[in-house]
Structures are given as C-alpha cells and as structure tokens.
Image: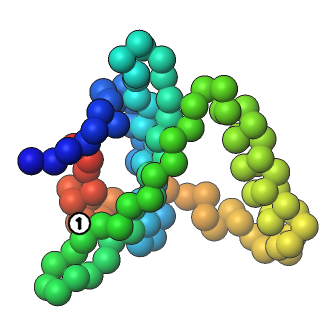
Amino acid sequence: MEDNRGNDREEIFSKRVKAGKRTYFFDVKATKSNDYYLTITESKRRMRDDSFTFEKHKIFLYKEDFAKFIEALQEAVDHVKNDLMSDFDFSQFEREESESEFDDELKWD
C-alpha cells in the first residue's frame, strides 16, 4: 500500500508536455479547504534491467507565487533566447510532437 501522507490531493486540471525523453506535468490540485496550487512534475524514463522506470522531480507552486514564478521563468527564457543564443532559430521547437507508443505508461494515478 502506498503512503502519500495526505500530499496527493484531487486533481482539478492536468496538462502534459512531452519533451524528448522527458515529460512535464502541470497539475492543478485543491487543498481540503478548496485552495488551489500547481504541481510541476518532470518525469524521465530510465531503463532498469529489462524494463522502464520513471524518475520524477516535483515542484509545488502556490497561488501567491504564481506571478513571481512566471516573471522569473519568462526573464530566464528571454535571456537565453535574446542574449545567449540570439542567432539560434527556436521556431523548430514550437511545433507539436507526435504521440509516441509509450504514452499510456506516463499517466499518473
């Protein structure tokens, strides 16, 4: 039996972003008092023995930090795009990737 220690709340909204060997999950969840927060999870598929396992890293983002987080993320992305790699064509990454045969393995419970 898995012990989530009350950390696994009802999922209100979920968005999955596939990015090569990584998948990012953006999940909106509710607290017991109906306050909302966002979890951002990075999942990397790893080969172990003859099967796949998933290494996960999670960030909890609370409503009072949304604006600061978005501002800092945008500033960091803009710095890379405009200052560090201004001659690079990022448009090649803006297209939707096709679904892979492993999609079913990446679902969360």
Residue 81 position (above or below residue 70)? below
Instruction: Report the residue that reaches farthest toward the top.
Output: 33
Identify the coloring: rainbow
Residue 28 position (above or below residue 47)? above
Q: Quadrant of residue 12?
A: top left
Position in image of residue 84 (x %, y %): 86, 72
Quick one: label 1, few (<14), some, or many (20+) residues within 10 Å? few
Which residue is drawn at the image coordinates 16% and 78% (left, top)? 51
Which residue is drawn at the image coordinates 17% and 86% (left, top)? 49
Position in image of residue 103 (x %, y %): 26, 58
Position in image of residue 74 (x %, y %): 76, 48
Please state which of residues 27 and 91 is positioned toward the viewer in this rendering.
Answer: 27
Please state which of residues 62 and 19 is positioned toward the viewer in this rendering.
Answer: 62
Is residue 69 among what the camera can see? yes
Residue 38 position (above or below residue 50)? above
Position in image of residue 10 (x %, y %): 30, 27
Instruction: Report the residue that reaches farthest toward the right.
Output: 83
Is residue 97 among what the camera can see? no
Instruction: Report the residue that reaches farthest toward the left.
Output: 1
- Which residue is labeled 1 in the image? 101
The reply, left or right, for residue 98 in relation to residue 76 is left
Instruction: Report the residue that reaches farthest toward the bottom.
Output: 49
Q: Which amino acid does label 1 sit on?
A: Glu
Which residue is drawn at the image coordinates 57% and 31% (left, top)? 62
The reply, left or right, for residue 75 in relation to residue 10 is right
Please state which of residues 24 and 82 is positioned toward the viewer in this rendering.
Answer: 24
Which residue is drawn at the image coordinates 83% and 73% (left, top)? 85
Q: Quadrant of residue 50?
A: bottom left
Residue 6 position (above or below residue 95)? above
Please identify the quadrant where the C terminus is shown.
Answer: top left
The mark total stands at 1
Q: Classify mark 1: helix, strand or loop.
A: loop
